[in-house]
Image (cartoon, rainbow, N blue to C red):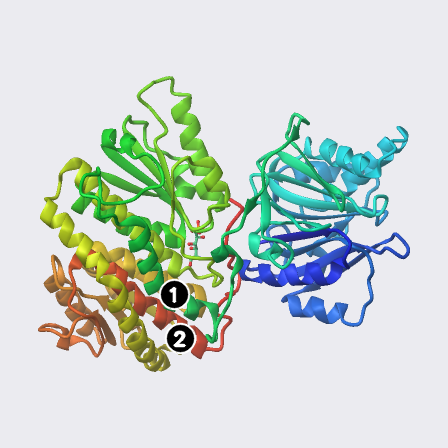
Amino acid sequence: MCGIVAVTGYRKALPLLVEGLEKLEYRGYDSAGIAVIDSDNKKLVCHKAEGKLKNLKHKLDKKIISGSLGIGHTRWATHGKPVLRNAHPHCDWTKQVAVVQNGIIENYFELKTKLESEGIVFTSETDTEVIPHLIQKELNNLSNLNLENSGSTLLIAVRNVISDLEGAYALAVIWSGSPDSLVVARKQAPLIIGLGEGEFVCASDTPAITNITNTILPMEDDEMALLTPLGIEIYNSENERQYRNPISLRLSEQIVDKKHFKHYMLKEIYDQPQIAKNWIKQFLRNDESSLTSINYPFDIQFLKNIDQIQILACGTSRHAALVGSYLLEQYAGIPTNVFYASEFRYSPPPLSPNILTIGVTQSGETADTLAALNMEIKRRQSSGKESYKPNLIAITNRLDSSISRLVPNIIDISAGIEIGVAATKTFFGQLLSFYGLAITFAQIRKSKTHEEIDKMISNLIKIPPILEDLIISHNKISEELAHNFSNMKDVIFLGRGINYPIALEGALKLKEISYIHAAGYPAGEMKHGPIALLEKKVPVISIATPGNVFEKVISNAQEAKARDSYLVGIAPECEGTEIFDYLIPLPLIDEWISPLLTVVPMQLLSYHIAAHRGLDVDQPRNLAKSVTVE
Ligand code: AGP
């Protein structure tokens, strides 16, 4: 989604901005631009280009732009097509103020209509363009006051303007009248300030600032800040100055290295065994005397009163939540519901006491998930009933994100920054967190015996080496199999029980990066409609792991075979699996932990199909890494 980077200091801003934007490319975007105040003539210089950043770099090639104050942006279209005129930065009619913005200004139309009635001509269809015009108008008003400090003047102008803005946004503003002042503001969209030596940087995501500093101050909602080479001033919505200590980025948040892999996605699939090792080390404990075998960074006493769980998430995180709900209900015996965060917000179930709400989001910034959690917190607080506590946990990969500030109890999956837009290793990390929660609830509720829990734990401990071998062998197999799929138009994924969400995830991965239509179904549901689609050109990928529903899945696969579909099985080599035209073999493992393995061929197959089709695997069209608009 849109990315912001802005800098003020002593070095030339342009290369720093371009470097920052390169680090934000993974978020997904369709145009890019920069604006710098030229130190020679104190004029605003603005350059933009449609498409990838390389187009902007090409435009900037050989341009000498001095000036150490600038803003940059990668845009993911919401209002107006992804064309040059809509790319950020946007300037006011006098070309003195430039603004980059993430999020959506909901009342822009009303503001625009008013500005147009005053004779201001708009050059884009964006919601953003109202902001620089409004700031310029404020600057004109403030000029009568003859304020001494131009930075403060800009700060006041921006403050006056944002008090009229509705929606969720993060923005950065520069003005040629104050050639070293950067003003930034945040409302429900991420923005962090990086503290360098003699320079300050602001960005919507940490990778964009690591070329300058590893020391950050995440901004809170409704805060704004003035950054100059001499320091920063942060203010809350009451215009009170805010003071707090900076924090250091963890090493995993600083390193985004592709190593020898062709794409980040492949590297991230290969990262998974290490994530399992880290999780085992961090979360499994040997302390017999403790309440549970899982090591949480927060007090879990409140979980003892929980008798129901609701999980809010989107996309891949929701699929992890579905595996989680299976574990929580079927293993730990606690009723659990999973909601699309975007639906929950507008149609939540009736309030009930003793419910635990879990938000799942790798980015920690997904607007739908944050809004749903916010709504849930507020409605519980305002219910007036003491028993309706907002018992909350969030599972995220970004400790520095908005969800970490919203939710008190965080399970950090510590997977390291994921660059591929298609989530792989963060899904895996989310699954592990749910295994931890299921063990915890099974212990608290005594729904499983010591022996059963020990068995689950020892099976989880065995995962890393099995996974390492599996990734190597499945990588080869998937590369080979990808050739058969590259001309397909529709693919069906089937799974049952704990592997049904993996079928959904397989279909989502394939759609996202290969643009092949795919759908996942519970295998037993196929005969109730989707079977009509089946024919030779519609392959069916079935997950069949020995256990509760193995024979049923094999029978469902037979039904597909009878309709001439090409059948791929993700299953062990055992009786029954000879039915598959192509077998991606699995080791014989306990069904409870099977999703940790069955997801791997899904990821690898999608990856190789997309790579074989020559597509942009890491930055698929129209998608964004963190979806910060509703
Ligand atoms: C995953 O491959 C997708 N890009 C997408 O569905 C994603 O899972 C969804 O947008 C939720 O993101 P989050 O985990 O950051 O909240």
Q: Position of residue 80 (x, y in %)?
A: 64, 53
Question: What kind of residue is marked 1?
Answer: Asp
Task: Find the distance from the CA under tag 2 to the CA under tag 1.
Answer: 20 Å
Q: Residue at x 78, y 44 (%)?
A: 181
Residue behind mark 2 = 609
Q: Position of residue 7 (x, y in %)?
A: 71, 52
Q: Which mark is residue 271?
A: 1
Is the residue at mark 1 in contact range of ligand 1, meaning its CB lies under 8 Å from it? no
Q: Position of residue 1 (x, y in %)?
A: 56, 54
Counting residues from the N terminus, which is met first, the one under dot 2 or under dot 1?
Answer: 1
Question: Taking 149 as reference, is 47 left or right?
Answer: left
Label 1 secondary element: loop
Q: Residue at x 15, y 75 (%)?
A: 573
Question: For the image shown, how many numbered marks are present on the structure?
Answer: 2
Regarding residue 530, the answer to whether it shows in the image is no
Regarding residue 292, the answer to whether it shows in the image is yes
**Vertical relation: 237 (above or below) 341:** above
Q: Quadrant of ligand 1?
A: bottom left
Q: Position of residue 474 (x, y in %)?
A: 30, 75
Snapshot quadrant of residue 392 = top left
Q: 512 or 537: nearer the eye?
A: 512
**Vertical relation: 250 (above or below) 50:** above
**Vertical relation: 407 (above or below) 271:** above
